[in-house]
Amino acid sequence: CREHGIFLNPKESVFGVTEGKLLGHIVRKEGMKIDTERVEAIQSLTLPTSKTSVHSFFGK
């Protein structure tokens, strides 16, 4: 880690697990997949129907 300038905080690190969540993905030794909770949250969004709601949707 030092060689690449990466610092680990032991209080925020978990070791010896077979699976974990990272940036909205589930990471396993077999590979990565999208967290189904995030997919469901996106699918349940109400689509904007006006110019004002589009701005609100994108946080502007």
Image (cartoon, rainbow, N blue to C red):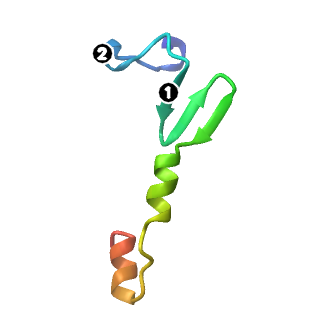
| Secondary structure under the numbered disc 2 in the rendered image | helix
Q: Residue at x 50, y 15 (%)?
A: 17
Q: Residue at x 38, y 73 (%)?
A: 57
- The residues tagged by marks 1 and 2 sit, at their Cα atoms, a distance apart of 16 Å
Mark identifier at residue 11: 2
Camera-near label (1 vs 2) is 1
| Secondary structure under the numbered disc 1 in the rendered image | strand
Question: Left or right: 56 with respect to 42?
Answer: left
Label 2: how many residues lie within 10 Å, few (<14), some (14-19) or many (20+)?
A: few
Residue kind at label 2, given as amino acid type: Lys
Q: Residue furthest right?
A: 30
Residue 48 at x, y percent in the picture: 42, 81
Residue 15 at x, y percent in the picture: 46, 12
Question: Left or right: 6 with respect to 29?
Answer: left
Image vertical order of residue 44 relative to residue 25, above or below? below
Camera-nearest residue between 15 and 37: 37
Image vertical order of residue 43 relative to residue 28, above or below? below
Marker count (numbered): 2
Q: Are marks 1 and 2 in contact (CB under 8 Å)?
A: no
Query: Residue 60: which quarter of the image?
Result: bottom left
Mark identifier at residue 20: 1
Q: Residue at x 67, y 30 (%)?
A: 31
Image vertical order of residue 45 relative to residue 32, above or below? below
Residue kind at label 1, given as amino acid type: Gly
